[in-house]
Image (tube, helix red, strand yellow):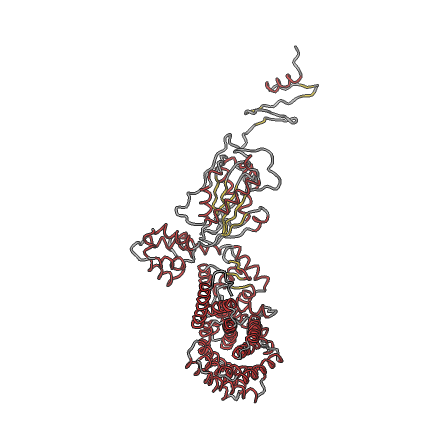
Amino acid sequence: MATPKRDRLGAGLASGRETEHDGLPMALNTMSGTASAVVQAGVIHGDVHLHPAPTPSVPSVPRQLPAAPAVFTGRTAELATLDRALAAARSEHHDDHLRPGWAGAEPPAGTAVMISAIGGAAGIGKTTLALTWAHRNLHRFPDGQLFADLQGFSPTGRPTPPADAARGFLTALGIDPAALPSNLDDLATLYRSMVAGRRILVVLDNAATIDQVAPLLPGSPTCTVLVTGRTILPSLIDRHGAHHLPLDVLGHAEARALLERRLGHRRTNAEPEATDALIELCGHHALALTITARQAAVHPAIPLAEFVTELRDLGLDALDHDTDPAASLPTVLSWSLHRLTDEQRTTFALLGIAPGPDTTLHAAAPLTGLPLPRTHRILRALREHSLLDRQPQGRYSMHDLIRAYATITAHNDLTELQRRAALDRVIDFYDDTAHTVHHVLHPHKGSRTAPPITGVCPEPIADQPTALTWLDLHHPHLLAAHRIAVTHQRHMTAFNLAAILGEAHERRGHRYGALDVWQATTRVAAYLPFYAAIRVHRYLGRTYAEHGQHQKAIEQLNQALTLAEHHHEPVRQARIQLDLQRAWELHGDDRQALKHARQALDLARNHGDPLSVASALNAVGWHAAHVGDLAAARDHCQQALTMFRQHSAPEAEGNVLDSLGFIAHRNGDHTQALNYYHQALESFRTTGDARLSADTLDRLGHVHHDLGKHDQAHTAWQEALRLFRHQDRTADAERVRQLLDNLDSASATNAHQAPIGATPP
């Protein structure tokens, strides 16, 4: 029987003989190796050699995770966040239908790998959290776990190339290293093929850039990826849909639990105050606490209180180690600077010496000497490197230990000239913006026309609410700037900052801050122009009076009065007489206070200062009411109110309205008293004067009480009590608290005595 054409072809192939087919010569090839099927797509000359694909017949199950952390406490919320992210991804990807080794149809449209990016500062506990979560969830990844330390921040400063990490993964997955491709794209493609459809956890630890991470991301939604790093990787979030999990310091209970786990309950319970002090001095920072616990653990006979003293005295140096970089917090922090530009590193250092607990963009720009947009980019970069935190109201802050390292960097890397120039610029910024604030709050008083020394621009202040908010937000910065100005012998700057702080303290009732500022400013008074020196003595005297230090108050005010008389300044003499009036009022002598008020009125009237005249009229009326001359009191205060309104001084109107309320109450006109007091409160709240608001609320409560409106009296006194306590006005707070107690007792007694069924008043 003739052999069919196909059979003859097959026979020819098998024998290796050359034959003809339809008159055409046929090339027969020799095949070495085995294959389940061979398809020839054309004429081939030479031998066909088949090599096995670099795929194992049975996929390996990698177990690359390092050991779980030996000591782990807290982070309950963060662990739950990771759990929820995984559960949501599994639900979205219908992962319940997938099985190990699944390589079926494409996943549903829109699905992606679940990626959680754990970010935070050096030593905050990112790797510890990632490994703890990974070990607690091993059962969710039956096809294995891959781990790579990408060395983004390390002693060498040389991050792991992604190609090296990919080779490590592929080898763990069972690929012969000799069969691996050489270039990154082919490695990444093969890696994605190997993990497709498998439930694998990939942990990419200590990443620095997206270029390290992107090639190592699986393409299959069955995989889960954890990325840790000090830098925020925007495109990992934007393009790959990563869930960003910012890691902060430990809570107090978590930090205490960490020390207890390492030192034992007996030791921490024996010194509870020292334990709490260690937590606070370490700033709740995980690595700092771990280092401190290790130092205490290897010296069990030394009391914890000694380690507290060491931390207080040495600061960051107490957390250093000469031979083990990973056990030294300063060294670990230094690795965060490896990837910064020179400009970013300089800004980081300057932020360490900036005045105040934090900064804003407008304050950081003069500190750096750079334009606002450029400064903003640098702050964003530092934030993305976890060296800076963004807070509400546009504030940027550092953890205390990071700031301590920034300060060290400033002194090591910058010259004294660089540091001094930066501080001069930022102090001028606060000085000039403070003058802008003062002008917005007191437009009738004029503003400074001379520019600051360094030519910086003040922050724009549009209106009074913005000005008051700025004063509150920057109160600690102004205090710090004032201290630097005194130290640097910037005499007029120190005075200017003291003046605006004095206003802020009066409005908010920060009495102790005011005393510190004016006492410090007296050290530069001898170098000031006479008019500034007069104000220093005036304001220090006023502050002493508020603190009940009457004799010191009178001495300072008399010194100011002598200077004003020597320089023939009657208007300033009038203002000092008003300060003396206030000092005697606080001392409880209304007749002596009235005497000084009348002297102030005579001086002001004789020398044509309408606002001083109005202030003196109000003071005379106030004290006349206290000595019983209600008619004269009302007449003087009405004149004062008219003059303040004529000269658009709303911040002073409230004071007169309060006086008129007191006079009406003394005269038995409770309705009119309520009306005046409510107008006064509205004025004080508009101008942000918490000190005078508290006084008026106190008096308003008495009017309500006399009218039998006990609920309204309770509300007014409760608010007054809150303000008095906030202002450290202890005696006033205790007096009002007693009024509230009496009111509550009376209400309870009336309720007890009321007959059954009676309607309460």
**591 to the left or right of 640:** left
**455 to the left or right of 741:** right
Instruction: Judge whether 524 appears above or below 401 on screen.
Output: below
Tell which of 367 and 478 is nearer to you. 478
Q: Position of residue 77 (x, y in %)?
A: 48, 49
Tell which of 418 and 448 is nearer to you. 448
Q: In the rendered view of the protein, which quadrant contains the N terminus?
A: top right
Tell which of 614 and 544 is nearer to you. 614
Q: Position of residue 737 (x, y in %)?
A: 44, 69
**718 to the left or right of 45:** left
Tell which of 176 and 44 is nearer to you. 176
Q: How many marks?
A: 0
Q: Position of residue 155 (x, y in %)?
A: 44, 52
Instruction: Judge whether 87 appears above or below 697 on screen.
Output: above
Q: Position of residue 551 (x, y in %)?
A: 41, 82
- Residue at the limit of the structure toward the left, as seen here: 301
Would residue 452 be visible to someone looking at this image? no
User: What residue appears at the point 55 percent right and 62 percent down from the top-left corner?
Assistant: 393
- Residue at the limit of the structure toward the right, as seen here: 23
Instruction: Judge whether 481 appears above or below 301 on screen.
Output: below
Would residue 498 be visible to someone looking at this image? yes
